């Protein structure tokens, strides 16, 4: 390590408006020592600070840094974050459909773009000294995970790799694999959430703590659920229509609680702002439609002018006919009443408006797909889960403990909230014991998703050669 680089961490620390945590200092020092680093820490702990320091080291050395993310929305956000830190003239963006200053010394991109560049021997790789892989635990993803492993295997050995991961239980095992294919590496693990998380279950219109002080399912909740199930199952004069009315008022059942009523309950319990995860774009849009049909209003009259001004600024370049085609009027009404959808199907102007208004506290509930859990900076006091099963290309799959932790990890705003809150809606598939098992699990192993086919083998041999050959 060059002596002049030693001052970079001290200089970097003076530019921040918060003190660095011990794990951040440890990881940054490893980078200064010209080592690769793997950082595993809970959502919201501040892992991306280490990635930003890697970019600073590249700039200080006259090199280049690629900052990769799993999704375009996160790439767009990191582009804005890094532009604010280092200047617009030093940061570019490559997401497949967007190309902004690809020759900049710091370029944000999706991991797929990096893999394509490595396999194709792109000239943009010239001068590359650092790569940051944000959300590197995505390599366990059944459908896309191989992208990360192929990129890591193809990356030149003289490029320093910073891998940022959510909490995994086999960090040392993953680190051992990285050492085997990359060389010297520091593994930095932080297990403490910056904001404690309290688990709840909503059943029959009532909000319960999920766990007792001993860590087991709260007996009050168990008794209540058992009682409600008996009431639902008991024979009586109630007609089918009567049973449906009971459920509409919030009684537990397969259909779940009435959505606008749950939103009103969250507001009454002072649990807003909240991210409500639904696993489909149509589901998110449908939730907004349900709220529009109700009397839900989460904003004050004084907020409306500011909300409209932000929305108008983001949509000013779009023709009125285009805005009509994408449902601008309904979207704006939802914003003015304090709720919105957030998913990849929204046009960028809508999505960016929602993100800004949520950050300002003017949108109080966002109905989002799980992509919002992947690092997008929209922290909330509360996360709501109405299902523990998500659709995949291979059919419905139950959430793993790691996925549950990733989703609920968005709850709790550092420096704002004393604690975050996770609220699960009761249903037969979300029994208290099931949820407690997910919430209490401490094993989130990271497993390889790489399946080496002909194309993969050719690309790896072309980039790394055949072991033992000359």
Image: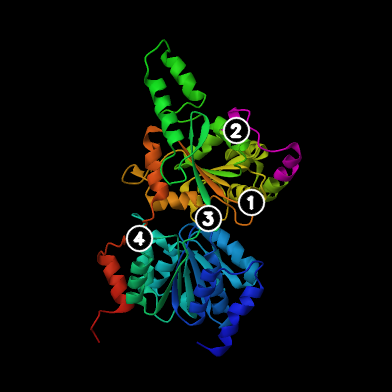
Dominant secondary structure of the magenta stretch? helix
Kindly indicate whether the residue at mark 4 contacts the one at mark 2 (C-beta within 8 angstroms): no
Question: Which tag is nearer the camera, tag 1 or tag 4?
Answer: 4
Q: Nearer the viewer, residue 329 or 234?
A: 234
Q: Residue at x 49, y 81 (%)?
A: 127
Q: Residue furthest left?
A: 468
Residue 337 spot, x, y in % from top left? 66, 36
Q: Pointer 4: what residue? A: 446
State the separation of the CA atoms marked 4 and 3.
Answer: 24 Å
Q: Pointer 3: what residue? A: 73
Which element type, helix, strand or loop, lies under badge 1? helix
Residue 359's disc is 1
State the separation of the CA atoms marked 3 and 2.
Answer: 29 Å
Q: Earlier in the sequence, mark 4 or mark 3?
A: 3
Which element type, helix, strand or loop, lies under badge 4? loop
Assess whether residue 23 is covered by the magenta stretch: no
Residue 273's disc is none
Q: Pointer 2: what residue? A: 264
Q: Residue furthest front?
A: 214
């Amino acid at each position: 390590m060059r002596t002049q680089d030693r001052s970079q961490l001290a200089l970097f620390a003076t530019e921040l408006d918060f003190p660095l945590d011990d794990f951040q200092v440890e990881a940054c020092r490893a980078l200064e020592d010209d080592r690769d680093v793997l950082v595993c820490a809970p959502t919201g702990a501040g892992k991306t600070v280490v990635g930003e320091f890697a970019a600073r080291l590249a700039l200080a050395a006259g090199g280049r840094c690629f900052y990769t993310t799993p999704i375009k929305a996160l790439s767009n956000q990191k582009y804005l974050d890094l532009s604010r830190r280092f200047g617009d003239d030093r940061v570019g963006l490559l997401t497949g459909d967007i190309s902004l200053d690809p020759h900049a010394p710091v370029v944000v991109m999706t991991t797929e773009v990096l893999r394509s560049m490595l396999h194709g021997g792109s000239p943009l790789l010239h001068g590359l000294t650092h790569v940051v892989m944000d959300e590197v635990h995505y390599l366990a993803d059944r459908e896309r995970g191989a992208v990360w492993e192929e990129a890591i295997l193809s990356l030149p050995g003289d490029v320093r790799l910073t891998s940022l991961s959510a909490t995994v239980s086999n960090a040392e095992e993953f680190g051992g694999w990285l050492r085997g294919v990359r060389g010297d590496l520091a593994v930095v693990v932080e297990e403490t959430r910056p904001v404690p998380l309290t688990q709840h279950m909503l059943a029959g219109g009532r909000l319960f703590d999920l766990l007792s002080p001993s860590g087991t399912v709260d007996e009050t909740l168990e008794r209540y659920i058992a009682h409600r199930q008996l009431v639902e199952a008991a024979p009586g004069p109630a007609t089918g229509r009567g049973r449906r009315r009971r459920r509409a008022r919030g009684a537990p059942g397969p259909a779940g609680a009435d959505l606008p009523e749950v939103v009103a309950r969250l507001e009454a319990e002072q649990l807003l702002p909240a991210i409500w995860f639904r696993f489909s774009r149509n589901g998110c849009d449908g939730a907004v439609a349900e709220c529009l049909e109700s009397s839900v209003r989460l904003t004050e009259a004084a907020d409306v002018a500011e909300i409209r001004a932000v929305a108008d600024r983001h949509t000013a370049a779009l023709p009125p006919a285009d805005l009509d085609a994408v449902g601008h009027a309904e979207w704006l009404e939802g914003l003015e009443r304090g709720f919105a959808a957030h998913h990849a199907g929204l046009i960028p102007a809508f999505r960016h408006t929602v993100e800004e208004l949520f950050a300002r506290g003017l949108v109080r509930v966002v109905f989002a797909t799980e992509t919002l859990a992947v690092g997008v900076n929209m922290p909330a006091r509360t996360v709501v889960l109405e299902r523990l099963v998500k659709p995949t290309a291979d059919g419905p799959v139950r959430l793993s403990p790691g996925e549950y932790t990733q989703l609920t990890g968005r709850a709790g705003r550092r420096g704002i909230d004393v604690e975050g809150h996770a609220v699960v809606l009761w249903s037969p598939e979300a029994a208290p014991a099931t949820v407690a098992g997910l919430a209490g699990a401490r094993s989130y192993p990271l497993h390889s998703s790489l399946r080496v086919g002909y194309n993969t083998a050719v690309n790896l041999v072309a980039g790394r050669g055949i072991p033992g050959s000359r």
